[in-house]
Image: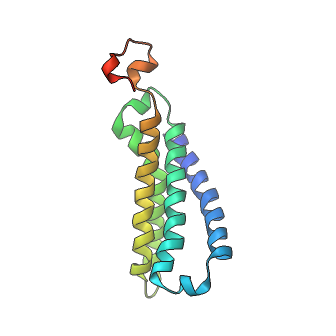
Amino acid sequence: MVVCWLVGLVAWFVCNAAGTGVVVRAAPPEQLAAFEGVVLWYGSASLVCTLVAAASAALAHRAPRCDRVGRDAAAALGAPVASVAVNSVLVAAEPSPAWGVFLAPAALSLVGAVAGWLLVRALRSRPEERRGAAVPTSRRR
């Protein structure tokens, strides 16, 4: 599980660095001055970065442990949720935190993390298909 968290953290750091670079270079300053622009630019970057981090961590979580939903969720969502928690602490440590500007991208981050985990879960084959057992035709896709 620690390997999954490390994979998720590395993916999150790399994607966040690239996403911040895109926002800094492509976003017009007048859009970043408005709440909608912050949600659009930083929120979309946060959503994509946590989606990639959770999907990477979920892919690193191999069978047979990935068959248990709780363990799989903890392995895939650990790094993205920890990043949101650390960002929350950093925002709270500021003298006058801008919670309105922070909460929308944070919520989109959590949505992206759950979406990345569910995407990988949906793309994985079922346990009975991995073991080579016969699967009823009604369960095949």
Front one among 32 and 1: 32
Does residue 82 appear left or right of residue 28 in this picture? left
Question: Where 7 sits versus 14, above or below?
Answer: above
Of the 4 image quadrants, the one containing the C terminus is top left
Residue 68's image quarter? top left
Question: Where 4 sits versus 91, above or below?
Answer: above
Front one among 25 and 81: 25
| Residue 28 drawn at (x, y percent) | 62, 82
Report the number of discs: 0
Q: How is the image coloured?
A: rainbow
| Residue 81 drawn at (x, y percent) | 43, 57
Residue found 45% across the figure and 20% down from its top: 130
| Residue 86 drawn at (x, y percent) | 47, 65
Residue 140's image quarter? top left
Residue found 57% across the figure and 87% down from its top: 30
| Residue 87 drawn at (x, y percent) | 48, 69
Front one among 57 and 6: 57
